[in-house]
């Protein structure tokens, strides 16, 4: 295989190793900064949901609000740079558009904004800025490896960063391939897996070896009741994911009326802080709360109440433009939903088995719904729980949830995914369209009409060819304006001669019921700008013309 920038080769795999190592260290450094802020603000090593209790409750809204204001100042500066330099900061957009680099300044200021939000308790995930900074490290390392596209190294670093956060190397590699590339092409996927695996090995060597969520010992019982509950969770999770996407969009629209980013994020933080007065479990990304759910710390009423509060808190934090991720908040919403529905099943005396296992099923389903990346969601939850008995139910729930959101025409929280869907749908439409859907009228004359009339029609319509049809509308052939001009000048014909005297009766044509792809292939065989369209090969009735331009414009929707 050649050593081009596009090929999969040993150099690519060797580059993935240091990229994965550095990306994992970057995520550890980010965690260290958040822990340092916790110690400074709360004098505690506990998660924010517990640490917040160090302060009197009256200060909680003020703390989260103040963090939002500070985050807003950092974000405002980053946005100003992006507008001035017209750059794309998000690593997924950089990978998808195959751009040269992840911008350093805007990434760092967005990370500072995220640190301010996360450190003060905003309901967002840590994985967003962690992966963004990992991608930035890959972009900076890419300068040392000119033999590879920088965007490919960014993709490796992003996969490695996500892998070191969730200890899920395969799912992380699939995520970047599925979301950013829109495909899982082997040549692009293998280096991502290598980088992700190196990141996890680094984390293991530093002592982070256990499954992220303690569900590896429990066994899912494969029976009718359990599978029905799984399907219910998948469908309801799809609706919950759709609702979360809609609420975030509405929240962004409402907060968008506030022009000042510090004020916007400050109000979002203040609102989340007031929700924390009901339960501090809504603060932060929700990792430790998921562990408590899996340990069985919540009864049904608590699960439902926290589900509503966490959805609102996440809507407020993300809607106010807090920089962070939706992964762990989505996982928490899914865990709450899954266990709540399973406990409702128990109340109805359904033999659903271990209700805590449905936390993982809900996690995968809501994550699939929100991200529209079901393959990633399945693998990630499996790798985070290390419970192979969950494979089949997680597959069912993830696919159902993803399909519900897709059928409700709701966009993914990742704009890149929406672009992939739009292109995919445009490609499907193109492949299934018929030629007659793009027909335009064509200039046509009877065979006895004069070449002078053909010249006049051609000048009026600005067409090189004029079609010839009989009184029944049957296509007979075409006359070329160039042929007419040449023969008139050589006095072979006069302007009064019938067009039948210069007609080409062997002109290529296409039929109205042919597919757009067949129309494309017809144009590939000729150098013409337009072709006559007939109803069928037997009657050959003239219907109009198909232009190459209209085909290209339609194809541009998915190219």
Image (tube, helix red, strand yellow):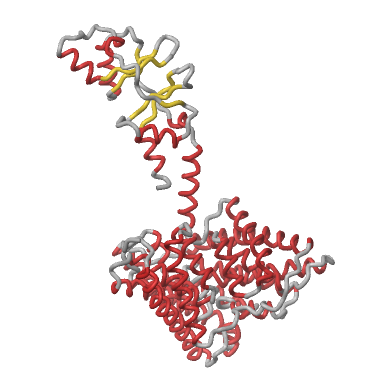
Residue farthest along the right direction in this orientation: 349
The residue sitting at 56% across, 60% down in the picture is 245
The residue sitting at 51% across, 81% down in the picture is 120
Quadrant of the frame with the N terminus = bottom left
In percent of width and height, residue 355 lies at 75, 72
Residue 179, can we see it? yes
In percent of width and height, residue 287 lies at 59, 78
Looking at the image, residue 79 lies above or below residue 527: below
Query: In the picture, residue 547 is in which quadrant?
Result: top left
Looking at the image, residue 31 lies above or below residue 260: below
Front one among 535 and 35: 535
Residue 252 is left or right of residue 98, and the answer is right
Residue 420 is left or right of residue 290, and the answer is left
Query: In the picture, residue 354 is in which quadrant?
Result: bottom right
The residue sitting at 40% across, 27% down in the picture is 440
Residue farthest along the left direction in this orientation: 490
In percent of width and height, residue 137 lies at 37, 75
């Amino acid at each position: 295989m050649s050593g081009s920038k596009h090929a999969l080769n040993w150099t690519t795999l060797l580059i993935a190793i240091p990229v994965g190592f550095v990306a994992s260290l970057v995520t550890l450094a980010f965690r260290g900064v958040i822990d340092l802020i916790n110690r400074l603000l709360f004098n505690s090593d506990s998660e924010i949901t517990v640490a917040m209790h160090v302060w009197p409750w009256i200060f909680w809204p003020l703390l989260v609000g103040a963090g939002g204001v500070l985050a807003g100042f950092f974000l405002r500066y980053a946005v100003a740079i992006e507008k001035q330099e017209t750059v794309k900061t998000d690593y997924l957009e950089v990978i998808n558009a195959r751009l040269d680099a992840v911008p350093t300044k805007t990434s760092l200021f967005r990370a500072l904004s995220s640190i301010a939000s996360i450190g003060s308790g905003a309901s967002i995930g840590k994985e967003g800025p962690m992966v963004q900074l990992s991608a930035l490290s890959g972009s900076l390392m890419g300068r040392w490896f000119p033999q590879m596209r920088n965007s490919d190294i960014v993709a490796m670093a992003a996969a490695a960063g996500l892998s070191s956060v969730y200890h899920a190397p395969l799912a992380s590699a699939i995520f970047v391939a599925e979301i950013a590339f829109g495909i899982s092409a082997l040549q692009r996927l293998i280096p991502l897996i290598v980088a992700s695996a190196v990141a996890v090995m680094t984390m293991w060597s530093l002592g982070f070896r256990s499954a992220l969520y303690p569900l590896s010992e429990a066994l899912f019982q494969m029976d009718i009741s359990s599978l029905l509950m799984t399907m219910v969770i998948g469908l309801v999770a799809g609706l919950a994911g759709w609702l979360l996407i809609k609420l975030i969009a509405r929240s962004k629209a409402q907060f968008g009326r506030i022009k000042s980013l510090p004020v916007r994020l400050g109000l979002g933080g203040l609102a989340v802080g007031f929700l924390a007065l009901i339960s501090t479990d809504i603060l932060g990304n929700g990792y430790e709360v998921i562990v408590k759910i899996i340990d069985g710390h919540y009864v049904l009423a608590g699960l439902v109440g926290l589900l509503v509060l966490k959805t609102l808190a996440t809507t407020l934090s993300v809607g106010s433009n807090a920089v962070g991720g939706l992964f762990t908040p989505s996982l928490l919403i899914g865990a709450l939903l899954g266990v709540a529905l399973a406990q409702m099943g128990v109340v109805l005396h359904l033999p659903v088995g271990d209700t805590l296992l449905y936390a993982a099923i809900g996690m995968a389903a809501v994550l699939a719904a929100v991200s529209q990346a079901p393959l990633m969601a399945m693998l990630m939850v499996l790798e985070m729980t290390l419970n192979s008995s969950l494979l089949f139910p997680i597959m069912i729930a993830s696919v159902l949830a993803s399909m519900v959101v897709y059928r409700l025409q709701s966009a993914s929280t990742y704009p890149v995914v929406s672009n992939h869907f739009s292109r995919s749908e445009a490609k499907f439409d193109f492949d299934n369209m018929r030629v007659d859907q793009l027909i335009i009228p064509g200039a046509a004359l009877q065979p006895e009409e004069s070449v002078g009339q053909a010249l006049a029609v051609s000048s009026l319509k600005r067409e090189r060819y004029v079609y010839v049809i009989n009184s029944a509308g049957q296509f007979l052939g075409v006359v070329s304006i160039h042929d007419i001009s040449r023969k008139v000048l050589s006095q072979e014909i006069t302007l009064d001669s019938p067009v039948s005297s210069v007609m080409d009766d062997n002109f290529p044509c296409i039929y109205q019921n042919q597919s757009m792809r067949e129309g494309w292939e017809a144009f590939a065989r000729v150098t013409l700008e337009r072709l006559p369209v007939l109803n069928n090969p037997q009657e050959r009735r003239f219907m109009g013309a198909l232009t190459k331009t209209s085909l290209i414009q339609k194809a541009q929707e998915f190219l």
